[in-house]
Structure formats: C-alpha cells, structure tokens
Amino acid sequence: MKLGLVGYGFGGRVFHAPFIHAAEGVDIAGVVARSADKIAQLAKDLPGVPVYSSLAEMAAAGEVEMVTITTPPETHKALTLEAIELGLHVVCDKPIAPTYPDAAEMVEAAKAKGVLLNAFHNRRWDTDFRTLKSVVESGRLGDIRAIHNRLDADDWATLEAGPGGGLLRDHGSHFIDQMLFLLGPAAAVDAKLDYMDLPQGTTDVSYAVHVRHQSGQHSYITGSKVNYYNEREFRAYGSLGTYVGHGTDVQARMVMAGHMPADDPAGWGIEPKEAWGTLHTEGNAELVSSVQSKIQDLYTQFAQAAQSGGPGPVPATGALHTMRVLDAAREASRTGQTVLLD
C-alpha cells in the first residue's frame, strides 16, 4: 500500500515515519510539506520521496492510496474530510477532532465514502502498557478493582497552548484510550482540569480524570507538564495483588535517541530489566519481564484492513468513544458534576 504523510513536524518525523518504514506492506510514496526546513529534512531522511505542497496535489499525482494526518490538532478535521472526499483511507493523529460531534461527522463521512478511518492511538502499543495488559489478562491480579495511569512531565516547551490544545487533548487522549481499550467503555466520568492563562489563550495544563467503566472497574488518569516533575506510572489493584510499573515507553526513547525500528526488528520494543514492573502478592514481590511490542504493527494492520475491508487496528468508532470521554471530562470539570454516558 502506498501511503502519503501529511505533515513532517516533530510528530511526523519521529512518531510516524520510522514506524511506517518498519511496517510490513506499506511504503511512503509522498509527503506534504511546505517550509524550507522541513523539505530539507525530508531530503535527508527520505531521499527520493516526492514532496507536495498540499494534500490535493499529492492525491492528484495518483501515487497514494492512504494518508496519515500528522499536522496540528486544529487541522485534523478539515484535512481528514478532504482526504475522505478524495477516496483515500486515513490514519488521523490524536485527537482526531476538537469535539465528539466533529469526530462523529468524520466517521459518517468515511462510511458514506466507503474508506477506512482509524485513529493514531499508538500508545496502545507502548511496551509498558502491553506489559500491564498482559499482567491483567493473565489473572494473576485476580479481579481488577482499579488502575491508575499517570504521566507527570517537566515539559513546558511541548505544551500545546490555547483553547484548541491543552494537555487533556494531548497525552490525555492517549491514556484515556489505553484505559478504555483495557477495561472497556465508560459509564461515568469525573474530572478536574487546571488552567493557566498563556499568550496563546487559556490552556488546561494538568488533569485528573476518573472513569467508571461499564464493567464496574475504575480507572484514574492523571497528567501534568508544568509541575517540574517527571514520573510515568501504572498501578493496578486487584483482589490478589498489585502491579506497579514505572518509566516511559522504550520505543519512544529509542526513536528520539536516533534508533530506528527497522534496524533491529527482533530486539525492538523490549524494556531493559531495570525498567521492569513489579507484581506484589501476599508475601511476595517479583519482577515482571517486559513483553515485546511494536508500534509499526498499527500500520501493518491498517494496510491489511484497507485491502481486506476490515475495521483496522484502531477503528474510528472506538476513537469516537474516547472523544466522548474527553468531552465529558471537560464538562465534569466545568460543572463539578459526574457526567453519565449512555
């Protein structure tokens, strides 16, 4: 399958292109970029790949069958609808739209056109999350009562400022999606968002979201970027014990250090022993070895689904529910009331 990359900023260059290159059955056949610095970077990173000034120009060249939208969040809806109208299958970075109604419009457009729309919730493939998932599904924790999912980052520079951005829409959408993927749909949402007045506008800079799932289980998702502290933690409480994992995902660390997933497929996506989590049970605490996970599998599975007519690895219908929970969290924080979901 021939894929077009729309945008080549930090996300496109670091979190998309390396994993597309490592995926099976996918080739980058074009990139939409306009600034001189990005075009120069493309000549270095992807020599010989055509560069276009717009999505329409790339589609008119007839070289791509599907696209990935990696541009800033406020552009996702318009570009996705344009790609759908052009008959292209779409992977849209998170959040796929500003609000749930916007996302629903995109899903309906894809259905009407008969193309596949998936969300880039790549953190379902984070190695630390996949290890947590394997522990939960093994039954060694017994009945799951609650899971805490936390990321504190001393990282003012990457805060997406302004009313269209904010931390909840940024990595909050990933971590809420992880919990919905693991524990199932939400039944009720409580939340507290903290805001700051920045030059770009009022922005949520930290969040605490409590989701009661239809299963009766609970998840607590918290994050910040302005508290001068770094910590990534999963904490899962069950009837038979507790699992605790720390550290950021090894795949993100490796890519940002310049390592490419295609260079070492067999050794990719495995946490070093010092980053393994611990399973605490009565009278015992044992390290849990990291499972292997590969973000490139998202693109491999998407290309297969585009050819076979399947739903894809992250169907937009699931992304719709994530958007509904994000909207509910903002509403719950604004009103101080629990928001019930049907």
Image (cartoon, grey):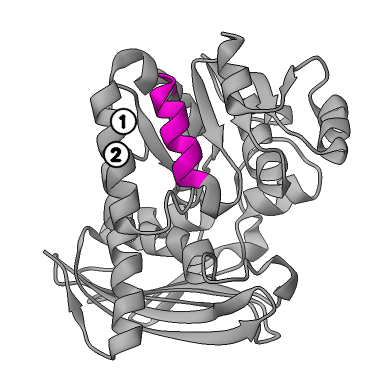
Q: How far across and down, in percent of the image, does residue 10 sit?
A: 72, 48
Up the image or down, 68 lies above or below 328; here it is: above
Q: Element at badge 1?
A: helix
Q: Element at badge 2?
A: helix
Q: How far across and down, in percent of the image, does residue 189 sit?
A: 25, 76
What segment carries the magenta color? 76-88
Up the image or down, 224 lies above or below 178; here it is: below
Up the image or down, 16 lies above or below 286; here it is: above
Q: Are marks 1 and 2 in contact (CB under 8 Å)?
A: yes
Quadrant position of residue 2 = top right
Viewer-proximal residue among 332 and 287: 332
Q: How many marks?
A: 2
Magenta-drawn stretch, dominant element (helix, strand or loop)? helix
| Residue type of the residue flagged with mark 1 | Ala
81 part of magenta stretch: yes
The circle on residue 107 is 2
- The residue depicted at 44 percent of the width and 20 percent of the height is 86
- The residue depicted at 46 percent of the width and 80 percent of the height is 207
The circle on residue 110 is 1
Q: Is residue 154 visible?
A: yes
Quadrant position of residue 44 = top right
Viewer-proximal residue among 31 and 34: 34
- The residue depicted at 56 percent of the width and 17 percent of the height is 59
- In three-dimensional space, the C-alpha distance between marks 1 and 2, rounded to whole angstroms, equals 5 Å
